[in-house]
C-alpha cells in the first residue's frame, strides 16, 4: 500500500515540524515569492551562520503541525509560498529576515511564534529592532562598570589634588 506509506511519511513530517515549533524560541514565517536563487542562497547563508534553520514547507503540513503544537493562530499567515525560519535565539531569525526584507522588497515577513506565542509581522519587526544578545550584555556591562569607573576617577582626582597641594 503505497498510499499508507505516503500518509505515514507525511505524519512523521508533521511531527518533526511540530517539534521544531515547540522547541524553537523564535519561528518566523515569510513569503519568499520573487526572490531569485542568488538572493535565497544569500539569505540561507546568513541564517545558517546565525544557527537558524530555514525551510520551505507546505502550508497544509505546517497547519497540522501548528495544531499539534497548540499554535493554531499560525494558520492566519499560512497563505501562499511559505518559508519558515526556526531559531533557538529569540532575536536572530527576526533580525536577519527583517534586515534582508528591507534590502529585498520581494521578501515579506508574515508573522511567527516567539516563545510559544503567536506574533504578527509588526511585532516581528519590533523584535528585530532589539540589539543582539551580545549587544545587550555589553550594555549591561557598561551600566555595571559606570559606578566603579566614576569612583576610580574620583579617587584619582583626590590623589592628584593632594599631590598638587603637597
Image: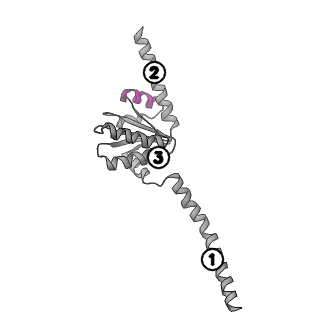
Q: In the image, which is nearer the foreground, mark 3 or mark 2?
A: 3
Tell which circle, 1 or 2, labels the residue nearer the N-terminal end: 2
Q: Main secondary structure of the magenta part?
A: helix
* Disc 3: CA contacts within 10 A as few (<14), some (14-19) or many (>=20): many
Is residue 6 visible to the viewer in this orientation of the structure? yes
CA gap between label 3 and label 2 equals 29 Å
The residue at which mark 2 appears reads as 11
**Left or right of 105 in this view: 56:** right
* Disc 1: CA contacts within 10 A as few (<14), some (14-19) or many (>=20): few
At horizontal 44% and vertical 13% (from top left) the residue drawn is 5
Q: Quadrant of the N terminus?
A: top left
Where residue 156 sits in the image (x, y, percent)?
Answer: 66, 79
Tell which circle, 3 or 2, labels the residue nearer the N-terminal end: 2
Q: Is residue 53 magenta?
A: no
CA gap between label 1 and label 2 equals 65 Å
Residue range highlighted in magenta:
59-69
At horizontal 44% and vertical 42% (from top left) the residue drawn is 47
Tell which circle, 1 or 3, labels the residue nearer the N-terminal end: 3
The residue at which mark 1 appears reads as 153
At horizontal 66% and vertical 84% (from top left) the residue drawn is 160
Tell me: residue 130, above or below residue 88: below
Tell me: residue 38, above or below residue 5: below
Tell me: residue 135, above or below residue 85: below
The residue at which mark 3 appears reads as 92
Amino acid at each position: 500500500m503505497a498510499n499508507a506509506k505516503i500518509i505515514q511519511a507525511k505524519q512523521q513530517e508533521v511531527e518533526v515540524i511540530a517539534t521544531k515549533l515547540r522547541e524553537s524560541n523564535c519561528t518566523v514565517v515569510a513569503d519568499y515569492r520573487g526572490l531569485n536563487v542568488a538572493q535565497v542562497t544569500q539569505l540561507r547563508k546568513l541564517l545558517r551562520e546565525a544557527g537558524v534553520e530555514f525551510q520551505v514547507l507546505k502550508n497544509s503540513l505546517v497547519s497540522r503541525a501548528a495544531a499539534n503544537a497548540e499554535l493554531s493562530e499560525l494558520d492566519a499567515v499560512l497563505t501562499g509560498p511559505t518559508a519558515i525560519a526556526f531559531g533557538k535565539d529569540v532575536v536572530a531569525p527576526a533580525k536577519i529576515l527583517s534586515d534582508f526584507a528591507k534590502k529585498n522588497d520581494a521578501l515579506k515577513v508574515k508573522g511567527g511564534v516567539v516563545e510559544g506565542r503567536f506574533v504578527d509581522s509588526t511585532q516581528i519587526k519590533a523584535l528585530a529592532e532589539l540589539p543582539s544578545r551580545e549587544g545587550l550584555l555589553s550594555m549591561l556591562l557598561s551600566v555595571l562598570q559606570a559606578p566603579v569607573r566614576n569612583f576610580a576617577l574620583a579617587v584619582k582626582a583626590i590623589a592628584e589634588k593632594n599631590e598638587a597641594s603637597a
